[in-house]
Amino acid sequence: MTTYNAPVEDMLFLFNHLKDNKNYNEIEKFKEISPDLVKDILDQAAKINQEIVHPLAKIGDESPCIYENGIVRSPPGYKEAYTKFINDGWTSLSCDPKYGGQGMPKTVSTFFEEMLSSASLSFKLYSELSIGAYNCILHHADEKIKNLFLPKIVEGKWSGTMCLTESQCGTDLGLIKTKAVNQNDGSFLLTGQKIFITSGDHDLTENIIHLVLAKIPGGPSGTKGISLFLVPKFNVNDNGSIGPRNGVNTLSIETKMGIKGSPTCVLNFDNAKGYLIGQENKGLSSMFTMMNLERIIVGIQGLGIAETAYQNSLSYAKERKQGKSNNNKDNKTDEIIKHADIRRSLLGMKSIIEGQRSLAFWLSQQIDVSLNHKEDKIRKNAEELVSLMTPVIKSFFTDMGSEITNEAIQIFGGYGYTKDQGIEQLYRDNRITPIYEGTNSVQAIDLVFRKVLDNNSLSKFISIIKEEVKTNQASNGLEKFSKLLISNLKLLEDFSNLLEQMNKSNKDDVSSACNDFLKVLGYISLAYSWFKISKISYKKLDENKNFYEEKINTAKFYFDKILPRAEMHFNSAKTGSEVIMNAKFN
């Protein structure tokens, strides 16, 4: 079984020293969120995740969800843990106090999302989509719906789901067949089937609130005719009490490679009563409020699982003896951490994970600005940056999670391949993250065609990095990092220009380059994060020498060993798509 210790010190370092977004610091209601308060929250979050949630990871994998007689039962211990989880208020952390929430900013709740992902992704998935449903209802439902449903969701007594996919369509939602027929009382009756519904049914909450995409007969074809509906498992009376069972039934649950403690359901809607959320035929834009948040959170899942993989690999490398290192002087067998290649693997993990955590913290500030700043223009600019970086966080973090969990298996050797140590489970659990909420290839296509070629948000992001470098390039220790970052920004601009030229002549060239471009932007974004981390670390070196020296050394490794991958991806993209499209695949 794996172990997990929440990286509270690193999280507090970011909150205390890299909360440097001027617009974020202007948000009045967040000024009272002090470092002491955040430390207390993170300490308590660490305790519940380490002591209660993390042991559930192995339990859920070995004793998965059960489906019998139309009922889904969660793994042993999940009910008790979930009861404490909601009693301690963790589902309400980032929710509006108006509905019983604590009103914490994303700069705090993102850390908790990471901890929960590290501890047990399966357990996390029971509450994760509830917060997504909460946000969607909060932004698009009428006041009656909000007041009726949000308090129970915030409390954690009711959970939420997102019902998009059908057997004939995944990403191409214009093909959905689920229909919604208007009733005289303003409600709708929904009929259809949805698949791959995370936490679509279970026994942890009193009710489950499904957000369902469906088409109203007579509406426009394709995605323009999609509407969004709230469909509860149990109907809800006007006074908030639970009524009779609605026409929603679970047909089966999937047998999966990983996240076995979380039920992935096939749901059947048979004249199920639902309520329109937002406007008719505008459901996809409403659902994107939930989907975009989930994509960022899925990226955090990849980060969280990678952290657990790194921690256990480091611990194992300090104990496992094998061979003699090159500087061995006593002719005794050494711990494998003394071997250069193992140290390379561990530093690779560490540099990517800590860079990603910093980038996620930077983005969380932008999210908070986009939602809460008083000036429309500032909110809009932040929203554009969030939109640009959402596919990067989702895809780059989860791809790196696959790389890091795979590397962890390699460090453990044969023990990593067996179930005893729990390392292979981390790989299996993470493997869904590059797939769900839009595959990483789809994310890369979205980034290039919608966020780069049809938008100038990339140039805004590049300008932010250039300004950071310009202001600090002469600072002690940052000269080399400055030069490398500037040269890679030039590469990024060249890549963007190349895509524009390709788009005029051969769109297959662009499509074949999308994944490469996303990786380039990901690696350079992490370099930006490490530049900011290093700036603080050099300034504070005398305050905590061991901590900041380690930060600086890890930054050096990243710039020397990881960032050069960006140039490789650019060189790959430049070769175009001719060879790809000429393949016969006989």
Image: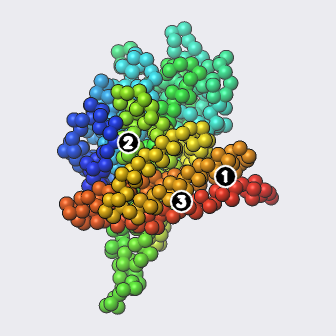
Residue occupying image coordinates x 53% and y 62%: 565
Q: Nearer the viewer, mark 2 or mark 3?
A: 3
Could you say where residue 457 lies in the image, as x and y percent from the top left?
Answer: 51, 40
Q: Nearer the viewer, residue 86 or 244?
A: 86
Query: Of the numbered discs in the image, which one, if any, rests on residue 8?
Result: none
Could you say where residue 168 lies in the image, as x and y percent from the top left?
Answer: 67, 37
Q: Marks 3 and 1, Cα distance to the nearest angstrom?
A: 16 Å
The type of residue carrying mark 1 is Ser
Neighbour tally class for label 3: few under 14, some 14-19, many 20 plus, Cα within 10 Å: many
Q: Is residue 195 in view?
A: no
Q: Marks 2 and 1, Cα distance to the nearest angstrom?
A: 31 Å
SS state under label 2 = helix
* Residue picked out by circle 1: 512
In the displayed structure, 175 sits above or below 467; it is above
- Considering only order in the chain, which callout, 1 or 3, is on the residue closer to the N terminus? 1
Would residue 266 appear left or right of 151 to someone viewing this image? Answer: right
Could you say where residue 217 lies in the image, as x and y percent from the top left?
Answer: 65, 18
Could you say where residue 368 lies in the image, as x and y percent from the top left?
Answer: 36, 36
Q: Marks 2 and 3, Cα distance to the nearest angstrom?
A: 25 Å
- Considering only order in the chain, which callout, 1 or 2, is on the residue closer to the N terminus? 2
